[in-house]
Image: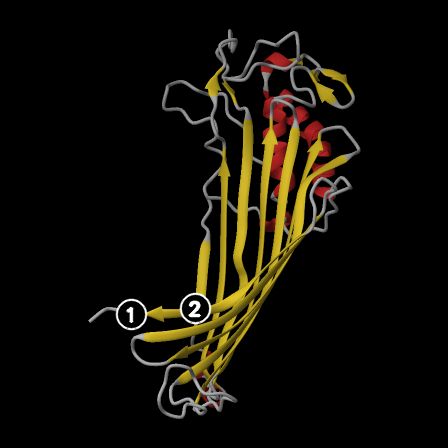
Amino acid sequence: SYISFQTLFTKTSPNEVSSTFLKFQDYRAILSKRLASQNPYSKDVNGPIPIGDGYYKGYTRYAQDVLIPAFLAAYTGKDPNSIALVKNDNASVSSNPFSGIKPLPNWRVSYNGLTRIPGMEKIFSNFTVSHAYNSTLSMNSFNSALLYQDPLRVSYPGFIDTLTGNFVPYFLVPNISISESFAPFIDLDMMFTNQLGARFEYKKSRQLALSLVDFQLSEARSTEFTFGGRWRKRGFPLPFKVPFTKKDTKKLENDITFLLDFSLRDDITSNSRLDQVTVLPTAGQKVITIAPSIDYVLNNRVKIILYFEQRRTEPKISTSAPITNTKGGVKINISLAQ
């Protein structure tokens, strides 16, 4: 479990490199100097050995030990000078090189005591406020590096791969990802004393996947608004007689419930590559849904539902076409339970 919402609400465009991603790129030079200052194999009598462009020996812009803390610092709003580094002190099999990354609590809060406030009970029969946050930081796998060397036993990598110019770390991590969501950020569910109900819900989520193989970051963002209304009425007058009944049913004796739900969801997925000025949108859509319905319970066994639902999808990339799905009809639920 993790906490990374510090950059969740920053403005982004699927066609532009985000400010957070630019920070990620800039933080690499800071992390390179930090690591070189600690690694004896990257220093001489004058200190860390520079290799140009602000980077130091064994810790180039694509070094794994540089990328992981730079990514976490940028996307969690932390200082790159104090973010935890990946450890290379692995004296035993049970050693944890990622122990500096601490698990952080997530939460869910729900409050329904507003109706206990004097005067509120005359307006609302129920009022519930909910808020929740969930985030996970994960590495799908990591393997021991066969070329790792530490000849001086100082718990730092000492062998530089001639192909990449980077120190070979103790563990090779192919990717790192963050998945987080406010589900919901705010949810207001209220029922008035006149049997009128309303609901508002706002959700926001993000999935980040950084590949340490091809140095791409895939970012998927989603924002959703939901509005709902309902009204329950007993003895509602009808302009027609209910079929299959003998008595006059133009005025209903049981409760009839009118419901209306409307939601707007905006999704976008884009790929950013390190040290490139372009962003590639790979997926995205705007989904608009409207769903009114009428529920009526004829008796304790039969329930009639008149419903309509329309879902419209507007893609954000040219390879997809707009889609509209519409359905409606009448449902009759019959309970056979004793």
Q: Is residue 248 left or right of residue 100?
A: left
For this orientation, the residue located farthest to the left is 338
Foreground of the two, 143 or 86: 143
Three-letter amino acid code at disc 2?
Answer: Lys
Q: For the C terminus, which image quadrant?
A: bottom left
* Disc 2 to disc 1: CB gap under 8 Å: no
- Residue at 56% of width from left, 64% of height from top? 309
Q: Is residue 93 above or below residue 267?
A: above
Residue occupied by mark 2: 331
Viewer-nearest residue: 280 or 116? 280
Percent of width and height locating residue 306: 48, 73
Residue found 74% across the figure and 17% down from its top: 50
Q: Is residue 61 left or right of residue 1?
A: right
User: Which numbered dot is residue 321?
Assistant: none
Q: Secondary structure at mark 1?
A: loop
Instruction: Give residue 100's position: percent from left, percent from top.
Output: 49, 34
Q: Is residue 140 above or below residue 236?
A: above
* Residue 72, x across and y down, in percent: 59, 37
User: What residue does disc 1 label?
Assistant: 335
Q: Quadrant of residue 204?
A: bottom right
Residue depicted at 63% across the width and 28% down the height: 67
Q: Amino acid at mark 1?
A: Ser
Inspect this view and state whether residue 284 appears. Answer: yes
